[in-house]
Amino acid sequence: MTQELAPTLRDRSAASPAGWWRDAVIYQVYVRSFADSDGDGIGDLRGIRERLPHLAGLGVDAVWLTPFYASPQADGGYDVADYRTVDPLFGELRDADDLVREAHRLGLRVIVDIVPNHTSDRHAWFRAAVDGGPGAPERDLYHFRPGQGPQGELPPNDWESVFGGPAWTRTADGDWYLHLFAPEQPDLNWDHPTVREEFESILRFWLDLGVDGFRIDVAHGMVKAEGLPDIGLREQAKMIGAQVLPFFDQDGVHEIHRSWRRLLDGYEGERIGVAEAWAPTAERLALYVRPDELHQAFNFQFLTCDWDAAAMREVIDDSLAATGSVGAPTTWVLSNHDVVRHTTRYGGGERGLRRARAAALLTLALPGSAYVYQGEELGLPEVTELPDTARQDPAFFRGDGQDGLRDGCRVPIPWSGTTAPYGFGPGGSWLPQPAEWAGLSVAAQTGDPGSTLELYRTALAHRRELPGLGDGAMEWQDAPEGVLAFARPGFVCTLNTLGQSVELPAPGRPLLSSAPLETSGGTVRVPAEACVWWEV
C-alpha cells in the first residue's frame, strides 16, 4: 500500500460515522525502542516522525505513544516529573508538535499516554512534600501515613508493590508514603481537588496541541478504599485482574473517568480516552466504557487467553456481550510493552510464529478495534537472553530476578541492514538486538509475500476494503472441535488451533491465509495452527 492511498482524517471519519475509534487499528509505539534520530541509542520523537510513512503504509488508523515527558526514567518514563515538558532524551516540545502535525497529514491520529495514578519522586509536588516534613500541605496530595509498631517502624498496611516488596517507603522523618509500583513512583491522592484540577489542565494542554486522545495508565488504580485496609494475603500482584482489591478497580474511579469524558467531548474531532484497566471480569471492565465514560478499554482477558479454541471462543463471547451491553466496541490486543511477546508466549520458534500469524488474522477479523504492538507486524519474538547488566526494568531489580523481564519485549525493532542496530539509528541501541533479527527487519520482509509484514499489510488493506469487517456483528458457524469459524457480512474467518491440518468445505473464495492452503474441488485443507479469511 502506498502512502498516497492513506485516507485523510476527514475521509476516515466519514467512512465510520459512529466514531473512528470503534473499528480503528491502533499501533503502539514504545518511544525508546522505535527509531533513534540522534545516535544516542534511544528512540525519540523525531525518529518516530521520520518513520511515520511505515505506519501509514501498514494501514493503521492511529498511533499510541508511550510517555515522552520529563522523567528520571526509573520506570521507562512512567515516572513523570513534568507532564507538560518533553524529556531531552526524546526531544523537545516542538518535536511533539511536529509529530502530531505530520501524523495528521498522513491520515494518522495520535494518542498519548497519561499517567495519573502516580508521579515521579522528582515531581515538584513530591519534593515539596518530602522537604516540608510532616504537616507539609503537599503531603495531602499523596498518601503519607505514620507507620505501625512501637516506633512506627512497620508499614501502615500490608499492601505490596506490583514490582515486588512493600508498597510503602519510609522517609527520613519517619512517615511512610504509598507507591503501588517503584518507590520512585509515589501514588497521588485523588480525593484531593488539586490533583483533579491539575490533571484536567494537563489534558487540556495536550488536547490544545492537537492530540486525538489519551491512553490512561493504571486507569483502575487512582482511587483507594477508605481507610486503606489490609488485604491479609501475600503475592498480591497475582490477584490483579482476578478480584477487586482495595487499591485497584474501586468504584470511585468511574466518577473521574466521567469527568474526563465530559472534557474530551468538549473538543472537536472525536478525542478519545482508552483505559488500561485490569478488572476481574468482562462485566467489570465494561463499566469503564459506559456511554458517559471512556471510549475503549484494553481487553486483557483476550491477551492472556491460552491457545485453545474453546477458551478463545468463551473470551470472545464474554467480551462482546459485556461491551455490547453498554453500547461500546470491544478491543483486541495480543502484546504490549508489559507482557511477553505473543510469538514467544504461543510457544516460540516456528510454532510460536505460526500461531502468532494466525492470531493476528483472528484479531483483525473480530468486531471492534485492534491494537498492534510495535514489531509484532515483523513477527518479533521476545528477547529472553538479555544480560542482567543491560536490564532496566525496575521489577527485575525489586523481584527475584525471574518476574521482572519486561525488557525482553522492549528491545529496539529492526528496520534494515545485516548488523545491529539494523537501522534503528546512527548509533547503537539501549538494549542489544539478536543477530537473527537481520532477517526480520522491515527492509528484509518488504515485498516478500510470505513474510509476516506483508501478511499484516494485506490484512489491513482488506479490513479497510471489506464493509463486513471492523465494527459490527458476527455469527459463529459450525466447525470441528479445535476449529473456530464465524461469519460477518460477506466474510468468513476460519481458525484451526490444532497441531494438524483439517479438511473443511470451502465457505467461499480464499482472500488471505496465515499459511499456504491446499484446495481440491469444494474442499480446503486448512493447515495446522492457521487462520483463513474468505469472501462469500
Image: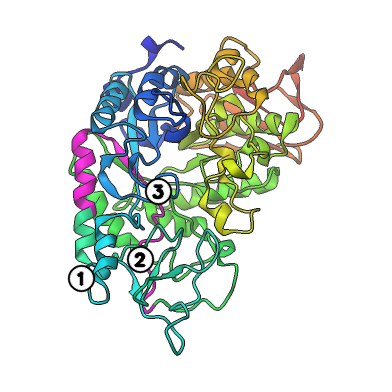
Looking at marks 2 and 1 on the same chain, the residue that comes earlier in the sequence is marked by 1
The answer to whether mark 1 and mark 3 are in CB contact below 8 A is no
The quadrant holding residue 387 is top right
Query: What's the image's color scheme?
Result: rainbow
- Mark nearer the viewer, 3 or 2: 3
Counting from the top left corner in percent of width and height, residue 348 is at 71, 35
State which tag comes first along the sequence, 1 or 3: 3
For the image shown, how many numbered marks are present on the structure?
3
Q: Residue furthest bottom?
A: 150
Q: Is residue 412 above or below residue 513?
A: below
Of circles 2 and 1, the one toward us is: 1
* Residue at the far right in the pictured view: 500
Q: At which x and y percent is residue 333?
A: 52, 40
Q: Which residue is mark 2?
A: 223
Q: Residues within 10 Å of mark 3 (few under 14, many from 20)?
A: many
Q: Which residue is mark 1?
A: 137
In this orientation, does residue 29 appear? Answer: no
Q: Amino acid at mark 3?
A: Tyr
Residue 78 disc label: 3
Q: Could you tell me the amino acid type at mark 2?
A: Val
Q: Name the quadrant containing residue 532.
A: top right
Residue drawn at (37%, 47%) of the image: 72
Viewer-proximal residue among 18 and 187: 187
Q: Are marks 2 and 1 in contact (CB under 8 Å)?
A: no
**Residue range (magenta):** 199-227
